[in-house]
Amino acid sequence: MSSTADLTLDELIEEFEFLGDWEARCDYLIDLGFELPKLPEEEKIEQNRVHGCQSNVWLIASDNTNSESTTIEFLANSDAMIVNGLIVVLMAIYNRKTPEEIIKTDVEEIFTQLELDRHLSPARKNGLFGMVKRVRQIAVETASRED
């Protein structure tokens, strides 16, 4: 299996389908959370905190520009293991994508396919969509700088 930083959405969906029930998927999310690269302590500041999350979540992004395009790389951490697993899901969806790809992604469809919409508590869903909103905001800001 890939490291969490390199996990693709297809690999994630395949693993979720293989696991079948929600309990096994939840355990898998927690395991992914343990493998999530750590955010440097100096980045855990209010400016990087994601609001709307029940747990503390910090998210940073960097632009990687080459001659063809700009992609965005994300790094995030939470003080809750299940949330770290959800961060890995978001990284599989968004990491190293162009701002345009991020903006066009139908994340709700992906969450439905993974059944996150059915099994997460309302507070966790709010936090997850808080992270999605932040990622999309970064993509919009990055795209506007390119114009």
Image (cartoon, rainbow, N blue to C red):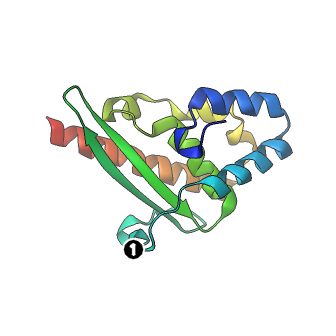
Q: Give the residue type at disc 1.
A: Glu
Number of marks: 1
What residue did someone put label 1 on? 42
The residue located at (61%, 26%) in the rendering is: 10
Q: Where does residue 13 sit, x and y in percent of width and height?
A: 67, 29
Residue 64 vs residue 73: left or right? left
The residue located at (67%, 57%) in the rendering is: 34
Q: Where does residue 119 sit, x and y in percent of width and height?
A: 76, 45
Residue 143 visible in this rendered orientation of the protein: yes
Q: Quadrant of the C terminus?
A: top left
The residue located at (63%, 53%) in the rendering is: 35
Rendering quarter of residue 7? top right
Residue 124 visible in this rendered orientation of the protein: no
Rendering quarter of residue 55? bottom right
In the displayed structure, 14 sits above or below 142; it is: above
- SS label for mark 1: helix
In the displayed structure, 5 sits above or below 59; it is: above
The residue located at (19%, 28%) in the rendering is: 67
In the displayed structure, 40 sits above or below 124; it is: below
Q: Where does residue 31 sit, x and y in percent of width and height?
A: 72, 52
Query: How dense is the environment of label 1, judged by Cα within 10 Å: few (below 14), some, or many (20 and up)?
Result: few
Residue 35 vs residue 121: left or right? left
Q: Quadrant of the N terminus?
A: top right
Q: Where does residue 19 sit, x and y in percent of width and height?
A: 82, 34
Viewer-nearest residue: 6 or 138: 6
